[in-house]
Amino acid sequence: MALLFRSTVDSAARWRSQLTRLTQQLDVRVWPEIGNPAEIDYALVWRPEPGFLASLPNLKLILSLGAGVDHLLGDPRLPRHLPIVRLVDPHMTDAMSEYVVLQVLRLHRRDLDYRAQQQAASWRELDQPNASERRVGILGLGELGQDAAKKLRALGFDVAGWSRSERTVAGVGSYAGAAGLAPLLGRSEILVCLLPLTAETEGIVDARTLALLPQGAALVNAARGAHLVEEDLLAALASGQISAAVLDVFREEPLPNGHPFWHHPRIVITPHVAAFTNPSTAAPIILDNIRRFEQGLPLLNRIDPARGY
Ligand code: NDP
Ligand code: OXD
């Protein structure tokens, strides 16, 4: 049995050593040295080139190296008849919640204002609401959104989330479907995007969405760059409708030189690092799914290509 590894992230050596340490039954092949493509049974991939998976004639299972699968479903030649599983790693979920909590606290505690004051050597106390008075809204109440919601709730924030179907998370408000979006936005002083990128969610954070937030609201986007209409954010920041944004993901990555986000005083940028895929914890999860496949057991975290996540 051969497992092909291909990623745009420079992590092949660590993955090879983790995978081979955990199993002797798999012949791990790292792209581009894949040998005979007809021998590949499983593909563990991040952003493979479009058409690449279709070039493996005996592929049985596609495993995403990330939680998101938009990097696969955007391939017009993707072998959609094959099962596709995504990565759900509790350590990655913790990492995303760390990121969300860090950024929500940064916005709540007016860190950007205090940094600007420090630049101006200005000593001035700013108004500070309690966490219980700060309403946080999360777009996407899945694996990541639910965990972030619980951790923000534990810090005392007034949290609600939005999903396709109604979700129950203790102490967290739940809004669902198209009808639930405007009410969720209307109450969100800090909006966090943790949606998958699908045909329905692309461009969801646009001028209309931003206008429905309370004036002076802030945005955290840790999902995908294409959720955000970048010009609309810049316009909303210029008008004061939005007071600040923290962005981990961008339409073009790396964010190009000269992009207006780079030097915007009210935008914080991180380079798509909110939640890393860590081979030491992710490899056993991936191998467990391959074992399940071999034994004919139900796969974990299988995605629905028609739904897009
Ligand atoms: P899940 O599939 O577990 O959750 C997705 C959530 O979004 C669900 O609550 C789902 O609703 C909701 N949703 C999907 N489509 C819609 C829609 N049209 N309207 C309303 N709600 C919708 O995904 P995860 O939480 O595991 O991951 C979310 C995304 O985070 C990933 O797809 C990826 O893009 C991004 N990510 C970013 C990382 C980074 O480092 N920046 C790292 C990891 C992930 P329902 O519950 O009803 O199904
Ligand atoms: C993911 C990511 O989807 O890191 O896992 O963006």
Image (spheres, rainbow, N blue to C red):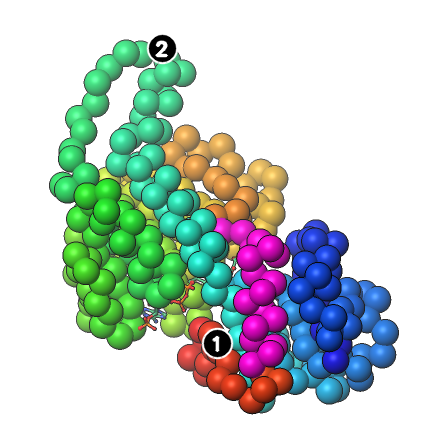
| Viewer-closest of 205 and 224 | 224
Please say whether residue 287 is one of the residues in the magenta stretch.
yes
- Residue 244 is situated, as x and y percent measured from the top left of the image, at 34, 38
The disc, 1 or 2, on the residue closer to the chain's N-terminal end is: 2
Residue to which mark 2 is pinned? 121
Q: Is residue 81 visible?
A: yes
Please say whether residue 213 is one of the residues in the magenta stretch.
no
> Quadrant location of residue 204?
bottom left
Indicate whether 233 appears above or below 224.
above
| Viewer-closest of 196 and 100 | 100
The answer to whether residue 24 is left or right of residue 291 is right
- Residue 178 is situated, as x and y percent measured from the top left of the image, at 25, 71
- Residue 14 is situated, as x and y percent measured from the top left of the image, at 70, 53
| Viewer-closest of 1 and 61 | 1
Indicate whether 51 appears above or below 6.
below
Indicate whether 20 appears above or below 244.
below
Indicate whether 38 appears above or below 158.
below
Residue drawn at x 45%, y 49% as measured from the top left? 95
The answer to whether residue 209 is left or right of residue 258 is left
Q: Report the image quarter containing ligand 1.
A: bottom left
| Label at residue 161 | none
Q: Is residue 223 visible?
A: no
Mark 1 or mark 2, which is nearer to you? 1
Please name the amino acid that badge 1 sits on.
Leu
Q: Which residues are magenta?
A: 275-292
Please name the amino acid that badge 2 sits on.
Ala
Quadrant of the snapshot with the C terminus: bottom left
> Quadrant location of residue 197?
bottom left
Residue drawn at x 17%, y 26% as measured from the top left? 127
Q: Distance between the Cα atoms at labels 1 and 2?
A: 54 Å
Residue to which mark 1 is pinned? 300
